[in-house]
Amino acid sequence: MNSLNSAELLDLYQRMLRIRRIEEAIAERYAEQQMRCPTHLCIGEEAIAVGVCAHLTDSDKVFSNHRGHGHYLAKGGSLVGLIAELYGFAEGCCGGRGGSMHLSDLSAGFIASTPIVGGTVPVAAGYAWGEQRRNSKNVVVIFFGDGCFEEGVLHETMNFAVLKQLPLVMVCENNQYSVMTPLYERQPARDIYPIAAAHGLQAVSGDGNKVEQVYALAENAIAAARNGAGPQFLELHTHRWPEHCGPNEDDELGYRFPGELLAWKQRCPLLHTGRTLAEAGVAAEALLDIEQRIGAEIAEAFARALAGQPPELADMERHLYV
Amino acid sequence: MSETLMLSYGAAIREALDDGLNRYPDMLLIGEGVPDPKTIFATTQGLREKYGAERVLDMPLAENGMTGICIGAALAGMRPVLVHQRIDFALLAMDQLVNNAAKWHYMFDGKQSVPLVVRVIIGRGWGQGPQHSQSLQAMFAQVPGLKVVMPTTAGDAYHFLLDAIADDGPVLFVEHRWLHHVIGEVDKQRPAAGLRGAAVLRAGRDISIAAFSHMSIEALKAATVLAEHGIEAEVIDMRCLTPLDVDSVAGSAAKTGLLLVADCAPEMASLGHVLISRLYQRQPNTLKQAPCLVAYPNHPVPTTHFQANHYYPGAERIAEAALELLAQRPLMDTLHRQLQSDLAKDQPDRSFVGPF
């Protein structure tokens, strides 16, 4: 792959592994019923968040959806803030008012995630409009799924984004499923990205499980958006391993083709990148060392988050109006 | 230096937009028809020429998308004012208004705010029909986090709009089309009202009439004629829907002992009902008689003027209801004659243009 050297790829691997292990840690503790909010894990999809966010500066902005942990973490959102938010503590990134589906860390440039499908898409474009009006060099990235592509508001947004040549990068994570409904029940047999191209966006597709490919496509798209070439569209193919919402896998429900999940697990972004690193001569010890550091970070983050305080009852009415 | 202007309500809105664009470099004025030759009933006239096409602009027909885009622009530091020529079109933007604009400040723990104004125009008559004349303000007022104001006078139109632009939260600014030609005083030096509180438009001792938007004008017309018969009605303009100023009405009702509420919306789940309910829960014993609500019927307005003429309650209905409450039924025929307009109910009555 083009410009990535071993050290850079190792860095991406480390970022992906961190998201994977955090999601696994959440899944492991979820049954304790102390994190009482709907939680959509992104295990299996880590390469997209990491490959895209690797090109963003602190002042670039990211918007996301209900499955937002990976995007939040890849953009540098506070881990303790995320965990505390899941537990509903005042120290959570939204003071416990949002839970898993509403994340925000303004200091990291992660503006917001919300769960109404399509809800943040125009908001991200509007933010990009604001950045453009200020003549900043910032880029706004919006992550959404293949289901979102069916929402009218996404097409309304593409129209305006092209009209105003906004510095917006739209990233469609095509994981083939909307909750448990396969793509072929929802959309005709055609690719998604040419429709974005027909709206006038520069649009390409790629393998969302190969981080080096995501990295290369995102590098071009983000640079183009930053340099005034208008909105960009990436359709990246991937798959989520866990159930739509919750900590478990649900392959026994039979909504996937037999063997489909297994095939995607064999295309695991970590497995793929680990193999590439090994071929490039990166020692197994280096990967083990990363595992250990991540494990320690997560243990500490949970300990810190769990030391949080419940929000004041008197605060329940606060922030209704500015 | 006091600068009191005599302006129509519509001109006051234009003046506020002009002053807002001048005062706030980050203000944007956007909406279908904003810069077109009709300029939203002339309320945006000349503003594109003065402030440029980047700040005063038309929009794609994408109400929900453009509302979301304005929310995003507001988060990024802009102050967008989005205009819908009919409130009916705002229904297409319910997701963004309700799920995002109204809740953003709350759900992200007060760290972000959405300084967005959405102008919506309600109205009546002239064949606007079922999808061009609805009065849906109660639906929006029900959403926590959305400020809903419905000014009646030119002075309030000017100040509320500027206050709404200055506000860091989302404000729904509800205009009644028939108010656009009503002339009133605009004192630019008047202190800001803070987008809250009702206003007493006419003081009286015999009966309290709390009215919304254009119904305040109808109530004033009724009160003028009632006064000729020695009945002094107090007219209170319920110009802010959230929060609803029950205190002012309670004070007036405690004085007069009679309450008539006139709403310009279908009766079902109306602000008029909310007002009566809250007042009654607070002080059931101050009223000498059960309160009365004059509102629109619970069916769409037909386009045909033959039927629409019988849809809208006006000054006559308010006066009749007042006489019922006052046990003055014998005066009814007289008042009816006095308030009878030579215009049909679906044509704006320009006999009462203010100022007040």
Image (cartoon, coloured by chain):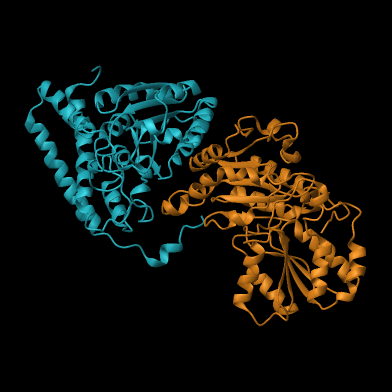
The x, y position of residue A66, in whole percent, is 36, 44
Which quadrant does the C terminus of chain B fall into? bottom right
Chain A drawing hue: cyan
Q: Nearer the viewer, residue A179 or B45?
A: A179
The x, y position of residue A111, in whole percent, is 40, 42
Residue A134 seen in this snapshot: no
| Left or right for B196, reference B201 | left
| Left or right for B137, reference A174 | right
Residue A28 to residue A130: above or below: below
Count of numbered circles on the image: 0
Chain B drawing hue: orange
| Left or right for B217, reference A191 | right
Which residue is located at x 60 percent, y 77 percent? B282
Q: Nearer the viewer, residue A212 or A186?
A: A186
| Left or right for A145, reference B332 | left
The x, y position of residue B22, in whole percent, is 65, 40
The x, y position of residue A295, in whole percent, is 15, 44
Quarter of image, res A43: top left
Q: Nearer the viewer, residue B56 or B232?
A: B232
Quarter of image, res B297: bottom right
Residue A61 seen in this snapshot: yes
Which residue is located at x 43 percent, y 50 percent? B111
